[in-house]
Amino acid sequence: MTARPDPALRPTDLRFGYGTNGFANHRLDDALAVIADLGYPGVALTLDHDHLDPFAPALARRVAAVRRRLADLGLGVVIETGARYLLDPWHKHAPTLLHDDPTRRVEFLRRAVRIGADLGAEAVSFWAGVRPERVAPAAAWDRLVAGCAAVVDAADAAGVPLGFEPEPGMLVEDIAGWRRLRAALGDPRAFGITLDIGHCRCLEPQPVPACVLDVAEHLVNVQIDDMRRGVHEHLEFGTGEIDFPPVLRALADVGYRGLVAVELPRHSHAAPAVAARSIDFLRAAATRAEAPAHAEASAHAETSAPAGVSARPARAAAPRSAPTDIPDRKAAVRM
């Protein structure tokens, strides 16, 4: 799981993927075909009722069919578990590991691990969830640690890396919280991190490329999107505040060879067009990241900017206090 710096890795060598949660109106077979036809070498597959439902009948047969489809299209895969209403048709994301009865969430994550193993997935990604108001922070934390321990056991047995994602507004929303959780679990080898580049801009106190360097040793999955400071809204590239060439340069510098998957879950209405624009943008940004003059200028801007401020001129954004280990804040969140 440890990332080893590879001086031969260039930004243009990065492997871009696209998330199926941005293709919610497509059949899975069709979504995979479009993603592959656009030139993406990988896909972030969100298990959901219309895209490989882990609770539907004949799961083994359907997983085998998806594995063949991925192989035929030459797509690498990571498993994402952020389906909104898969477990409860009335309440988004419920139950999480923080609810009174997290049994169905734990079972879902165990199934995700098994599916990931069967598909040859590079990682299985999951998150903490939002703390229910009636649950005290300490109790929610204990539930999270217990639930994650059960998932770690399943991942260890299956040989699948876990990428825990800090998510704005959730109990663990930042890198500091992820580190605290990993320590509480005993620093298990299988417990890596999913880093969403947009989330770094949204709330981390350090520049986005520094976030990549900070977690490089444990980085198993990357989601990429644009975002603004203090607002958790996944935006198309070029419409937020992130300067992407330095971010891609940082991923290459730490030797990251996993997928860098576009995460635009609210863009399914125009999925093929958005996916096409996204890969064109990322390829151009990767090429710019290799230009020495741009790299030097970007590095100077990042190091001279205040902590948490992008090299790109930022738009007006809400101020935010420094993160805490167990956040209990209300934020501008769209998940």
Image: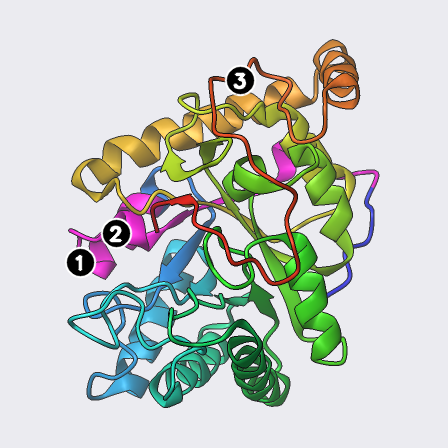
Residue at label 2?
31
Ranked by sequence position, the earlier of labels 1 and 3 is: 1
**What residue is shown at x 77% (from left), y 20% (from top)?**
299
Residue 14 magenta-highlighted: yes
User: Are the residues flagged by discs 2 and 1 in contact, CB closer than 8 Å?
Assistant: yes
Which of the 4 quarters of the picture holds residue 83? Answer: bottom left
Q: Using the image, determine if residue 208 lies above or below residue 93.
A: above
Q: Is residue 111 visible?
A: yes
Residue toward you, 176 or 47: 176
Q: Quadrant of residue 268?
A: top left
Q: Position of residue 219 (x, y in %)?
A: 67, 56
Please, what is the three-letter code of the amino acid marked with disc 3?
Ala
Mark 1 sits on what residue? Answer: 27
Q: Secondary structure at mark 2?
A: helix
Label 1 packing within 10 angstroms: few (<14), some (14-19), many (20+): some
Q: Mark 2 belongs to which amino acid?
A: Ala
Circle 3 or circle 2, nearest the eye: 3
The amino acid pointed to by label 1 is Arg
Q: Is residue 129 magenta?
A: no
Disc 3 secondary structure class: loop
- Write the residue at 40% across / 84% down: 111
User: Which of the two discs, 3 and 2, labels the residue nearer the N terminus?
Assistant: 2
Is there CB contact under 8 Å for labels 1 and 3?
no
Label 2: how many Cα within 10 Å (few below 14, some 14–19, many 20+): many
